[in-house]
């Protein structure tokens, strides 16, 4: 008698457990299905005018926005060694010194000889590996490259923000500080390509046919 009752109780418990397992499995499967089912707008592109930090329809946080024509133009600088690509503007070393003290000295030192978070820019001694730092004056082969780099990449917190006359002035300042041009020389799209850098012959010519 007691064995029969025990057997029946055990059977009821086992049946209840089975039902609970089935219910849990159904609930879990339903939740997983909901998580894996894409939203109606999951494949819609984020709005170009999304508020920074706001969650867009595709689950992103609204970071970034399409580049404007002005931003592209500021970055689209391609200056060749012969001066192709230089804009019509001009600047002098005296003008460049004033700009340098405001926008460059905090990274490169008060005169460009000290360095800091940025590299040293001024050292007119001939470049010697391990003995002298690579600077605008002793390492860069073309003066036009100085313009190209400053225009596209400087200052690091606002690249492309300098106007052409400001870039020419900074180039003139750095070339004069490195004893390459006179203090009263005017740098523009005609005079800058004619500046001969001390290390112009320090690089092996590039043999690739696709490189101008």
Image (spheres, rainbow, N blue to C red):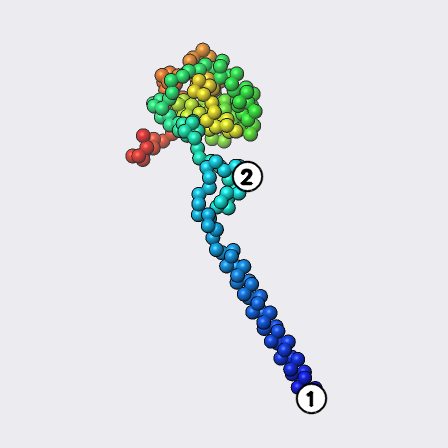
Q: Nearer the viewer, mark 1 or mark 2?
A: 1
Measured as percent of width and height from the top left, residue 130 is found at: 50, 31
Picture residue at 55% right of the left edge, 66% below the top = 25
Extreme-right residue of the structure: 2
Residue at the (56%, 69%) spot, across then down: 22
Q: Is 104 or 63 nearer to us in this picture?
A: 63
Left or right, residue 77 beside residue 30: left
Q: Looking at this rendering, what residue extends furthest in the bottom direction?
A: 1
Q: Local crowd at mark 1 within 10 Å, few (<14), some, or many (≥20)?
A: few
61 to 39, vertically: above or below: above
Residue found 41% across the figure and 25% down from its top: 148
Give the class, few, some or many, for how many residues have Cα within 10 Å of label 2's Cα (few <14, many ≥20).
few
Residue 73 found in image quarter: top left
In the rendered image, residue 140, in percent from the top left (x then y), is placed at: 42, 26
Q: Quadrant of the C terminus?
A: top left
Query: As drawn, is 156 to the left or to the right of 188?
Result: right
Per the model, the C-alpha gap separating discs 1 and 2 is 72 Å
Please tell me whether mark 2 sits on a helix, a strand or a loop.
loop
204 or 191, which lies in front? 191
Rendered image: mark on residue 53: 2
Q: Is residue 139 visible?
A: no
The number of callouts visible is 2
- Residue 149 location, quadrant: top left
Q: Secondary structure at mark 1?
A: loop
At a point 44% along the width and 29% down the height, the residue shown is 71
Q: Position of residue 190 (x, y in %)?
A: 36, 16
Q: Residue furthest front?
A: 40
Tell me the quarter of the image containing the N terminus: bottom right
Residue 139 picture quarter: top left
Instruction: Report the disc number at residue 158.
Output: none
Determine which residue is flagged by label 1. 1
Q: Is residue 112 above or below residue 11?
A: above
């Amino acid at each position: 008698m007691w064995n029969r009752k025990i057997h029946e109780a055990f059977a009821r418990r086992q049946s209840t457990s089975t039902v609970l397992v089935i219910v849990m499995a159904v609930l879990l499967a339903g939740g997983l299905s909901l998580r894996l089912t894409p939203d109606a707008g999951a494949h819609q592109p984020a709005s170009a005018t999304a508020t920074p930090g706001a969650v867009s329809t595709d689950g992103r946080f609204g970071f970034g926005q399409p580049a404007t024509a002005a931003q592209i133009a500021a970055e689209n600088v391609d200056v060749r060694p012969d001066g192709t690509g230089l804009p019509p503007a001009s600047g002098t070393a005296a003008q460049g010194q004033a700009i340098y003290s405001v926008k460059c000295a905090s990274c490169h030192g008060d005169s460009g000889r000290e360095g800091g978070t940025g590299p040293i820019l001024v050292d007119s001694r001939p470049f010697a590996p391990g003995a002298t730092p690579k600077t605008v004056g002793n390492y860069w082969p073309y003066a036009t490259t100085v313009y190209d780099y400053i225009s596209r990449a400087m200052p690091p917190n606002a690249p492309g923000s300098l106007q052409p006359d400001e870039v020419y002035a900074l180039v003139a300042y750095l070339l004069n500080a490195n004893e390459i041009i006179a203090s009263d020389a005017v740098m523009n799209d005609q005079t800058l390509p004619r500046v001969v850098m001390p290390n112009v012959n320090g690089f092996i010519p590039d043999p690739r046919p696709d490189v101008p």
